[in-house]
Image (spheres, coloured by chain):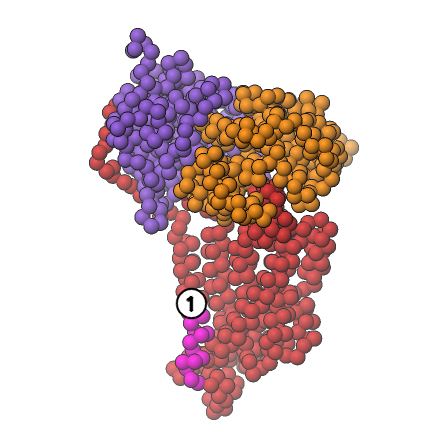
Chain colours: A orange, B purple, C red
Amino acid sequence: MLELRDITAGYDREAPVVRDASLTVARGEAIGLLGPSGCGKSTLARVAALLHRPESGTVLLDGEPVRRWRHRAPRGLRTAVGVVFQQPRLSADPRLRLADLIAEPLRATGRRDEIPQRVAELAPAVGLTRDLLDRRPHEVSDGQLQRACLARALVLRPRWLVCDEMTAMLDASTTAALVAAVEDYRAATGAGLLAVGHDHTLLRRWCDRVLRWQEVTGRIPPATPGLPRTSGPQQPADVPPAGDR
Amino acid sequence: MTDRTPVLSVRGLSVRFLMPAGRRIAAVTDAHFDVAAGECLALIGESGCGKSVLASALLGLLPANAQGAGEARLGDLDLLSADERTLARTVRGRLIGLIPQSPAAHLTPVRTIRSHLEETVRAVSGARGRAAVRAAAERAAERAAFPADHLDHHPHQLSGGLAQRAATALALVGEAPLLLADEPTTGLDRDLVDHTVDELRRHVDDGQRALLMITHDLAAAERIADRVAVMYAGRIVELADAETFFGVAGPRHPYGRGLLQALPDRAFTPIPGMPPALGALPDGCAFAPRCARATDACATLPPSTGGISCHHPHVPEDLRA
Amino acid sequence: MTCESAAEPAWRSYGVRRRSTTAVRLRVSAALVAVTVLAVLLVPPLVRLDQQTVDLGSKLLPPGWAHPFGTDDLGRDLLLRCVYGLRISLLVGVAAALVATVIGTAVGATAGALGGWVDQGVMRVVDTIASVPHLLLGIFIVAMFRPGVWPVVVSVALTHWLSTARIVRAEVLSLRSRPYIDAAVSGGASRWRVAVRHLLPAVLPRAALAAVLMVPHAMWHESALSFLGLGLPTHMASLGNLVQGGRSSLLAGQWWPTLFPGLFIIVPTLAVAGLAGAWRERIDPRRRSELML
């Protein structure tokens, strides 16, 4: 079980982005988390991947509470959760060939001897061909790069997978291919999935259970963007407060 | 609706990039299409298929290592052979209004929306004098449904939807007969996509403008387009009415069919394989290696007949019956 | 609408626009830097003249055929003196820039990568040092040693690593929040591995650029120290020493002993700066306009 209990997190103590969010992903279960952009769901995804220390709340991996985050988290816990982010261009080290990108977690954890075998297994699983593996990120398309990023997330055989808007930048066919690759992996290993996104059609098709942001936090997300903002803080800054005049 | 005289008429448009070591990248090959006033043509395809390059070619914004061929007629002007001076003075803003991807990044952060609009009004219209410019800017904002009380705001104070409207207002100022929207919905939430697309549609429905929308978002294309052009590996492989394309009959080119079948509200099955690199296209049909219908005939380039470039297109139901 | 164009279409090329000024600047700068480097490397071994040869019979001669730059108050050939002076100034400048870049990169990368109180502490120290005028601090450092090349190099390096540290730290901070660093952490990479394998290679081009841009600064700084009589000993006259030496005759209307060494400081430093500027346009992604598919 991957459990998030009453998580409050953000980048500014005064104004946390996520307040009191709770959700649970059981082994083998696929949870979709649906929310508008800017509601804090990416921050919650980073907390779930132990990449961001929450200000309060508990994260439990198979009942074991997480006490340290990022580099300080025990390697075994960190690598138990694989992550894929929205923008492949920003998620890939621009200097690494795709094969090295996929193998990087094996190098980092001192399992070099597994590299040839794992890369050879994963490349076809995510639909990458041999010649693409020798290219660098700027020589491949967004879709191809995202396939490599997914392979990198799977290379250490994580028990959970966190996909943060994994397919938001991609076309329909690549989206379907990546989702199929995730599902094949989950079917083979029984890994849990937390898929974060704003496309309800996609998440409902992909996941066992789809949670709305307000169900997770007990709060209604900020008003749908697109409608004019009229309230207080967005007033032009050069208007002095009434008392100053 | 195709009997109307087209606003933009593209014939045999090709763009290639000359790379170091004599490599050639065929980004767009032999594109043919028209867009008429009051009509929206959606150019769809995955990222890297050449559709953004096509937009750059129409605006004369190709980098120095690009070469172009063919013609793109906008009225009496061929956009591909026009010099930079003509493009800058008469085309951009006046004949083509560009609605950019990520509008917030397209606006100068330190200036208000009003100042953006007034500058554009001064640059592209005959309005002179403070009052006239101000009035014209406010009219432009109104046309794009941008609220007047937000005109003095800076771009970062606007929500995504309002920034999009501000960018649209700017594109509308010059009364351009052609609107070019380049991935206007990327990264937006579904509700906001619908909203943005509906507003764009409104600007076409008055019959004065043509809209060419470049997108990889099939749902957005379905919502807005009259006709659809599907681009694969630099070629337009299918040009069809949106109703037929998204409707019961469906696309006739196997690639278009595959794309629709990949949608999560349809079969959700990907097209096997990946598109070829534009630097190493096969001699024949570029889709053949991924196509279930491919035969030996596909080793030669299919001719374009009835808007389809395929040796074995799907036959519409009514013809089979 | 059948459209088979079997024949190769007529290709048109676009733009040689917005390239020209950069290209000209790049070429002029590169040519000047090349001339400088060649002069400094080749003239001393090829021209077997002693720049120290004193000829009191021909002191303070104006520029002419025998002495293109004229002679100084001891009758020494100024052209030769300038080339030797440039050699020493350049040596000190390059050495100081290298030392400063190594210190600055190490400090900046450590502060940026560790963050937290380490970052706060280190950057406060940097701010404190930066609040003292460079030259004053430089003088203080030189004054602690016997005159020589190394005290000057140390003085210049210790006053110039601050800007590199700031640049590198800012770069590391901006990279640190990239998803690819998150992905590396999630993939089990240690703090050390993230710093050495992912952050450092990404900041090195910036640091190298800062190093090149620093060479002119370092040369100016050295010249200023020498001009004040605190730099190199006079038997290793740098350009600053030469300007200083020419100062006394300037009031008597003899301009050449000041002008030519001055030009030898200004022209090569501008050329190096110009070259670095062109390079920055190349590595700075915001200015890139090449093909993106």
Q: Tell which of B235 and B263 is nearer to you.
A: B263
Q: Tell which of B132 and B23 is nearer to you.
A: B23
In the image, residue C38 lies in the stretch drawn in magenta: yes
Q: Which residue: 31% across, 38% down?
A: B68
Q: Which residue: 27% across, 40% down?
A: C11
Residue numbers of the magenta segment: C36-49
Across and down, in percent, residue B273 comes to 40, 32
Report the amino acid beneath label 1: Ala
The overriding secondary structure of the stretch rendered in magenta is: helix
Quadrant holding the N terminus of chain C: top left
In this picture, residue A77 sits left or right of residue B226: right
Observer able to see residue B249:
yes
Q: Which residue: 56% across, 69% down?
A: C95
Q: Quadrant of residue C168?
A: bottom right
Find disc 1 in the rendering and name its residue.
Answer: C34
Residue situated furthest right in the rendering: A243
Across and down, in percent, residue C34 comes to 42, 67
In this picture, residue A231 sits left or right of residue A198: right
Q: Tell which of A181 and C202 is nearer to you.
A: A181
Residue at disc 1, secondary structure = helix
Across and down, in percent, residue C17 comes to 38, 47
Q: Quadrant of residue B39?
A: top left
Q: Residues within 10 Å of mark 1 (few under 14, many from 20)?
A: some
Quadrant holding the C terminus of chain C: top left
Is residue C48 positioned above or below C20 on the image? below
